[in-house]
Image (tube, helix red, strand yellow):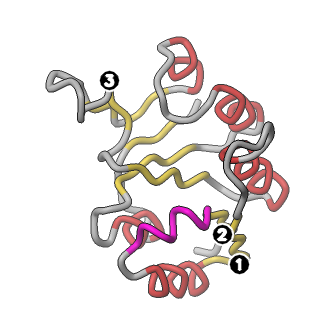
Amino acid sequence: ASFDCVICSRTLMHLADWEGAIGELCRVATRVVVVDFPPRLSFGGLESAVLRAIEIGAEAILKATKVDGIYTADPREESDAEFIEQISYREVLEQNLRVMDSTAVTMAKENNLPILVFNIHHAGAVQGILAGERVGSIVEG
């Protein structure tokens, strides 16, 4: 299967084998866009990644984090935080979950663009997602 992909350069910095990940993306994607943006822009960060993804007709946003996906609270701070495998855009906004800022979530919702949230430190996570495996959490619907 071929698809378009947008990936943030900051995500690549955290990959032990970033060259291998880019190689895998290029092998299966029709177009790969690496987005880089300065910190603290009024319209930057994840909004820029979502906008680029919409512009190229990408199938999903890959949101790399330091935890396994979306939780009811920060699992690094709260031991009783529960993992959420699948959640709607509306629920993310209503529950004020820190998946990404509300503007980016709203843009993804308005364009029916799923957000896949996964742990960047798990070996093979990006490759698993590209192979269609269920990795982390998904925001859709």
Question: Which residue is labeled 1 in the image?
Answer: 30
In what element is the residue under mark 3? loop
Residue 100 image point, x, y percent: 56, 35
Please tell me which of labels 1 and 3 falls first in the chain. Answer: 1
Looking at numbered disc 2 in the image, what kind of residue is underneath it? Phe
Left or right: residue 39 versus residue 62 is right
Residue at (35% x, 54% y) in the render = 119
- Residue extending farthest right: 55
In the rendered view, tell whether residue 136 sits above or below residue 34.
above
From the viewer's perspective, is the residue at label 1 or at label 3 nearer? 3
Question: Which residue is labeled 2 in the image?
Answer: 3
Residue span colored magenta: 8-15
Looking at numbered disc 3 in the image, what kind of residue is underneath it? Ala
Residue at (24% x, 35% y) in the render = 76
Question: Which residue is labeled 3 in the image?
Answer: 73
- How many angstroms separate mark 1 from mark 3 (CA)? 36 Å
Please tell me which of labels 3 and 2 falls first in the chain. Answer: 2
